[in-house]
Amino acid sequence: MKKNLLGYEDIKNQKLCILCWIAYASTYICRLNFSAVMPELEKLGVFPESQIAAISSAFFICYGLGQVVSGMLGDRFSPRYLIFTGLAVSALSNIAIFLVNTFIPFIILWALNGAVQSMVWTPILRIAGDCFSPYERERFGIHIASTVPLGTLASYGLSLLTLLFLPWKYVFLVCGAVSLAAAVYWITGTKNIITEKGKVSPPEGRPAPSSLSFKKLAGLMASSGIFILAISIVIQGTLKDSVTQWIPTFFSQRFSAGTGTSLALTMILPVINVTGAYFARFANRYLRNELKTSMLFFAAAAVFLAVLNFFGNNIILALICMAGVTNCMFAINVMIITMVPLHFSSYGCVSTVGGILNAVAYIGCGALNMAAGSVLERSGSSWSALFIMWLVLALAAVVSTGAAVIPWNRYMGKQEQAD
């Protein structure tokens, strides 16, 4: 059968991929806009660094905890309505921030934003498992992975454009309006696709999600090495999101760049990071193992962090190193957060496993992001101390990922025999 533009045999799968892409990309618009205004909040004295870090961590922790719940819901209920709810409430939370002036309501609304955004990713994974063939799932995973850097670029670009003409509060109003439009587009665009292709009933031969008990699920994850991999997942989440979040502040403090200049420099990174998913795909075709591929990129990130720590006073070199770190993390994100859960499709628990992995990543990131704020505050904004912390984490991830390779190989061997 002739393949269409994105490489799918079914034109409806192409449209579904595009809709999922827009939905997930829009979550970054209402997520990283806070990172975009962080230098402005600090410069104007709206919140101290510890409170800024607390607000950021509230999102990560609530997003992570929500992943567990949404993962289980995603295997049992229509992903169409779960995704719409997540997008719509996230948009409204951002719009509400425009109306508040103090720390407590701000952190509550930002935490709510994190909780409801968790309802988007895991249902998308279920759609991938139910509606696409095994070959198409890899293609879908690569396409969806590009939402992260491009969604980041859209968020920073929209925020920068707003800040050029309006006070920082309007960033949340504008981003919320864009995300609300994406929610409407999702619910209308999927009307004749999700109901037809996947309400989403398990394909023939796959056990129903409810047939896999919590005990069996835990045993499956333990035997496959996922529990060991949890350390690496925490670190990947930290080096992907925490590093991205602190970049504008770094350029502002280290090089005395204005908010506009900091955001403009930061926007270069997502352009480069688009290639991360494709680097991961290229490397994995040779290594044929998601965990070995992840080890390679963790090691590369450690090299970039070491160079950043010792030679980070040069703005060009610092930008290159930060781009290298985040690019490596996006590559690992494709391998661990996207592709690994899809290997549990035959058990009918793609969404649940994906939710657990994402939960581990974001809860760990939330905790370590608070540590990052504390390190900066106690060291008098000494970025070297933070870079060393990130370097140690990257090296620890190389070890923990390597420890999970053997049980993962055993699990994949059984999967191939079953197929």
Image (cartoon, grey):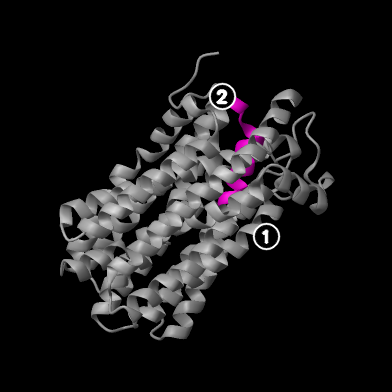
Image quadrant where one finds the N terminus: top right
Question: Given the image, on which type of amino acid does mark 2 rest?
Answer: Asp
| Residue designated by label 1 | 69
Percent x, y for residue 22? 45, 46
Question: Given the image, on which type of amino acid does mark 1 rest?
Answer: Val
For the point 61% across and 44% down, the residue is 404
| Residue designated by label 2 | 10
Percent x, y for residue 357? 60, 52
Percent x, y for residue 108? 51, 78
Cα distance in 3D space between marks 2 and 1: 31 Å
> SS of the residue at dot 1?
helix
Percent x, y for residue 97? 42, 75
Res 290 quadrant in image = top right
Residue 153 part of the magenta-drawn span: no
Q: Specify start and end residues of the magenta stretch as a single range.
A: 121-135
Q: Earlier in the sequence, mark 2 or mark 1?
A: 2
For disc 1, the neighbor class at 10 Å (few under 14, some 14 to 19, many from 20) is some
For disc 2, the neighbor class at 10 Å (few under 14, some 14 to 19, many from 20) is some
For the point 41% across and 82% down, the residue is 100
For the point 35% across and 81% down, the residue is 378
Residue 128 part of the magenta-drawn span: yes
Res 125 quadrant in image = top right
Mark 2 or 1: in front is: 1
Camera-side residue of 215 and 117: 215
> SS of the residue at dot 2?
loop
C-beta proximity under 8 Å, tags 2 and 1: no
Magenta region's main secondary structure? helix
The answer, for residue 315, to whether it is visible in the render is: yes
